[in-house]
Amino acid sequence: MADSTNPTLRALSTFASATPSVHYVTPSSPDFDQLRAIYAHPELTPLAILRPTTESALASTISFLARNKIDFTLRAGGHDMHGRSTKPNTVAIDLRLLNKVQVNPTTSTATIAGGALIRDVITTLQPAGYITPIGSIASVGYVGWAMYGGYGTYSSRFGLGVDQIVAARVVTATGEIVIADADSEPELLKAIRGGGGAFGVIAEVTVKIYKLDRILAGILVFDSSNLPGVIHKFEDGYRALGKDGRGLPVALGLHQVVLNFPTPTFGVLVMWADEDIETGEKWVDRICDLGPVVSRNVTQTTPLAWLEEQSKLVAQSTQGRMWTVNLRRITDEVAGVIGEFASRFPADPHVLFDLHELRAVSPSAASGAGVGKDSVFNAREPHLVVEICPTVSDAGKLESALAWGQEFCDALKATDKANILDASYVSFLAEDEFDLQSVYGENLGFLREVKGRVDPGNVFRNAISYL
Ligand SMILES: Cc1cc2nc3c(=O)[nH]c(=O)nc-3n(C[C@H](O)[C@H](O)[C@H](O)COP(=O)(O)OP(=O)(O)OC[C@H]3O[C@@H](n4cnc5c(N)ncnc54)[C@H](O)[C@@H]3O)c2cc1C
């Protein structure tokens, strides 16, 4: 039922009545609270929610909102840590009913609809015996993950998410559906790869897929009674073992974490993306040798089972934010800062610290000829993405957790400048932390040109902006 005093709600109600392929959800709908929920910002409530069920319904929705100058956000998995998918008094377009995933074995690609979650992708790929790189949590939106970078443990072998995208279907501000691929609109395709959703709604991406249906994966829990000590020892040994990332096999993916388990504990999620499980076991032994491991729960498994297992490590929803910095390596100085802040870890089960990696051996790292030239994703040097998440279950602990997170990030930024990459990960940055020139470098002008051509009225103003 429309609020008769609000002209936007009246207009939405009229549009929805005439467009049954779009579900209209208002604050008085019984499922509003469940559908509006996003990962980290329970306080954010949209004006109403529109849920298109087909690509053409999505196109009609965009053209209606743009014509009527109604501000909107787009949401898929709702995992943006800075609340970019929901704004107060703004219509939220929920893409999750557009979640079809289709495998195309003849071209070794899959088409993935704009609202598909990482879980949807692997649920379809695995029975066909394929994988594509993914992040660690099943409920994250695939397109949101991939188009801004897409880090994960499969990236050493297969590359980052952003480099898997070979084509996209984009609903532009006028409600037109544009195909961006190597032949048609290659500039738009390049801009989406790293530049994301500022040009339109990505209704579908086509991505590369790879044969792989079994992996070795699990969690190594390190004795954390002396947390700074165990972190130092691990980082020291890891640098030496990996020869700064060049000595480790491509199949090996590592994700270092500190979690309250229930007290602050250092762990490593290991994943061996190759069917030669025996060799994988030997590499897991070597990683175990980097510290006193108190629990080794690493087994042969499937990508889907491992995805679900990792997803249990984080809350379904929380409150807080994230800080980030990209580092070339974990030097002794950096390990000292991590150790210090790990030992002052806020006492809430949702607080999280972790490190994603782009290793030198990855097809996405700059060592390959021409790597990254067809994208605007700039962080191509081998690096580690520091993710500091002062997220809490108890709102009473939020302020002190945020103070810890800010201080932690400042301390990392005060370490040797030569070890800090200019480009940071846009998905993890807050609006007021953007230094567009550093993030996009020489591609910034190109991004602005494409934005000016494809969305001159800045209809997609709530996406990460380049203006
Ligand atoms: C618990 C957690 C785990 C994470 N794990 C990883 C990880 O392993 N690796 C990694 O690289 N990142 C990771 N991230 C970051 C995550 O990938 C990004 O925040 C991503 O953008 C989230 O996408 P979403 O659809 O879930 O979020 P949403 O909040 O729904 O969307 C994020 C942004 O993308 C836009 N968007 C989403 N879909 C579309 C579309 N189809 N068309 C146009 N715009 C769109 C939205 O408008 C919004 O601005 C993680 C984040 C969290 C909170």
Image: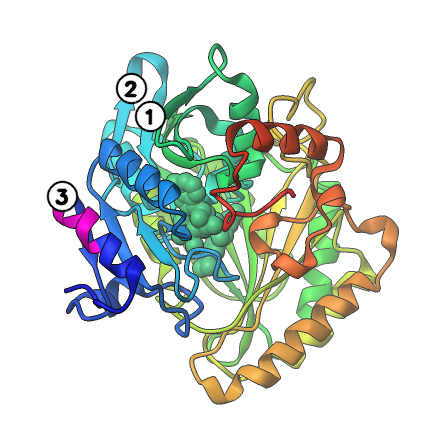
List x then y, in percent, for residue 171: 37, 32
Q: Nearer the viewer, residue 79 or 254?
A: 79
Q: Quadrant of residue 32?
A: bottom left
Query: Does label 2 or label 3 sit earlier along the sequence?
Result: 3
Instruction: Examine the structure image and report whether residue 19 is included in the region drawn in magenta.
Output: yes
Label the magenta part by its dominant secondary structure. Answer: helix
Q: Is residue 18 above or below residue 111?
A: below
Q: Quadrant of residue 214?
A: top left
What residue did someone put label 1 on? 110
Report crowding for label 2: few under 14, some 14 to 19, many 20 or more residues within 10 A (C-alpha). some
List x then y, in percent, for residue 140: 39, 51
Mark nearest the camera among 2 and 3 is 3
List x then y, in percent, for residue 77: 36, 52
What residue did someone put label 3 on? 18
What residue did someone put label 2 on? 104
Q: What is the span of residues highlighted in magenta in the rendered image? A: 13-20
What residue is drawn where x is 74% and y is 55%? 330
Q: Nearer the viewer, residue 174 or 283?
A: 174
Q: Secondary structure at mark 1?
A: strand
The answer to whether residue 349 of the structure is visible from this angle is yes
- Kindly identify the amino acid type of the residue bearing the numbered disc 2: Asn
